[in-house]
Image (spheres, helix red, strand yellow):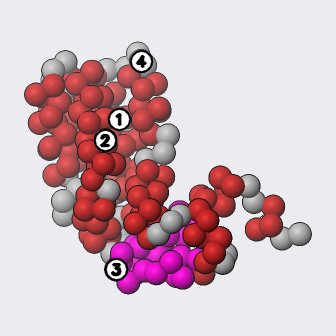
Amino acid sequence: MTRKAVLGDEERKKEILDAALYCFLQFGYSKTSMDDVAKQADLSRPLLYLKFKNKEDLFQGIFDYTLAGSYDETEKVLYQNISPKEKLIRVCELNLIEPWAKIEGRPKTAEFYETCSKLSPESTQKYEKQIVKFAERILGDKKTAEVFFLALEGLSADLPKTKVLRKRVELLCERFSR
């Protein structure tokens, strides 16, 4: 029995999402087909369609997969006995830097980043609300948290390397937590 034959449903879905992320970052959304993803994931197109109804559904799944678990982990950080600055940095690490590291530096990173907000507006809005909510709990008020989020969004506008993004986040968190 092959390794593929014994994969559970969640493991199979993860493999598909990893394959799709690879394809979208290599070829772009418009040039990636469900065939490409099926080949990359080493499975048949019919099986792929059993898991995802179409390319948009698959792309939506990637957005959610990229942030999987980060909100729960962030909730734990908010209760840790660490400084506000350290909390902000950790929130950003979980919700921006770690996901960014998965997409940064690939041929179609810019397009992927743009496509996320176009094809996944609900997930994008959920993400924004979550980050603002987390920042508000650390910084104390919603307006400051909203400005923090907008500044945070701007840090990745020029598609920096993860190391550069991390330095920028540290500087931003230092300024906001004073």
Where residue 126 is drawn, which disc sits there?
Answer: 2
Among the two numbered marks 2 and 4 on one chain, the one whose residue lies closer to the N terminus: 4
- Rendered location of residue 7, percent (x, y): 75, 60
Identity, as a three-letter code, of the amino acid under mark 1? Val
* Res. 113 visible in picture: no
What whole-number distance in Å separates the C-alpha atoms at marks 3 and 1? 32 Å
Above/below status of 106 relative to 68: below
Image coords of residue 8 (percent x, y): 73, 55
Q: How far apart are labels 2 and 4 at the CA level? A: 22 Å
Q: Name the residue tied to disc 1.
A: 91
Residue type, numbered disc 4: Tyr
Whole-percent x and y of residue 122? 30, 48
Dominant secondary-structure state across the stretch colored magenta: helix
Please determine whether, in this image, residue 161 is positioned above or below residue 178.
below
Quick one: label 4 or label 3, which is nearer the N terminus?
Answer: 3
Q: Read off the magenta span.
A: 15-38
Amino acid found under the numbered disc labelled 3: Ser
Q: Is residue 32 magenta?
A: yes
Crowd rating for badge 1 (residues with CA inside 10 Å; few <14, some 14–19, many 20+): many
Q: CA distance from mark 2 to mark 1?
A: 15 Å
Counting from the top left corner in percent of width and height, residue 75 is at: 42, 26
Residue beneath disc 3? 30
Please give the residue where the numbered disc 4 appears in the rendered image: 79
Q: Secondary structure at mark 2?
A: helix
Q: Closer to the observer: label 2 or label 4?
A: 2
Q: Are marks 2 and 1 in contact (CB under 8 Å)?
A: no
